[in-house]
Amino acid sequence: MPDLGWRGMAVHPQQVPPGADQVRLRAVDAATDPDGWLAVTGPRIREVISLTDYLQSSSAGRGPVLIDFQMAFLLPCQREIPRVAGGLAQAPVAVIEPSRRYPPGELPTSTIAGGNFVALNTEAQRRELPTRLRGSPDVEWGHLVLLDYPLARDAYAVEQRQSTVPGWAGS
């Protein structure tokens, strides 16, 4: 049986009776083994904003978003992606990953393969922002992970110069 982890349950504001100020939860643990468990947290009120609007919000200081390979087909309009050029990869401010059902394409961040974004695993602090699909709040579509860096992003000086060296002269 797959590990489902935490599952968010959404209640549409129209389902809440006027004047309600309390929530009653009824949960049933259907596990038949002694290691089964059940837990709940308190309710949260979230501001709803589209993913596109959130990612393009300049007032929030957004920047390039690294989109996992599988998710790129779902987000064809996301244009601000990290630039890779001149031997440098721009540090993304967020990553969009697939749900737990599908393994992430780890090649860009792989320490074994040496991907362009390998520093995400060693330098960035990951913080998942809760998300859901409009009209299907129980469907796990993927994850929006915000990245916090202990140092300034892309704060390096680049100096380029050209020199011609014969092959027998070494480097």
Image (tube, rainbow, N blue to C red):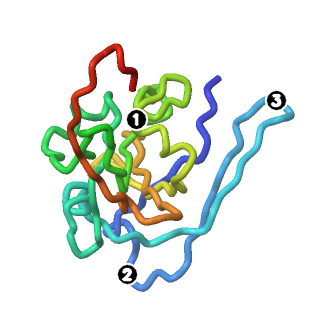
Relative horizontal placement of residue 58, taking residue 19 as reference (left or right): left
Q: CA distance from mark 1 to mark 3?
A: 30 Å
Residue at the disc numbered 2: 18
Query: How packed is label 3: few (under 14 Cα within 10 Å), some, or many (20 or more)?
Result: few
**Where residue 138 sits: x, y (%)?**
42, 45
Q: Based on the displayed image, in which of its 4 quarters is residue 98 positioned?
A: top left
SS class, disc 3? loop
Say what secondary structure mark 1 lies in.
strand
Residue holding disc 3: 33
Q: Amino acid at mark 1?
A: Pro
Horizontal and vertical percent for residue 62? Answer: 28, 64
Which dot, 1 or 2, sits closer to the camera? Answer: 1
Pick the quarter of the image with the N terminus: top right
Q: Which mark is residue 98?
A: 1
Quick one: 131 or 122, which is closer to the camera?
Answer: 122
Q: Residue at x 40, y 71 (%)?
A: 16
Query: What is the x, y in percent for residue 160?
Result: 24, 46
Of callouts 1 and 2, which one flags the residue occurring earlier in the amino acid sequence? 2
Dot 2 amino acid type: Pro
Q: Nearer the viewer, residue 98 or 11?
A: 98
Label 2 residue SS: loop
- Classify the position of the C terminus by image quarter: top left
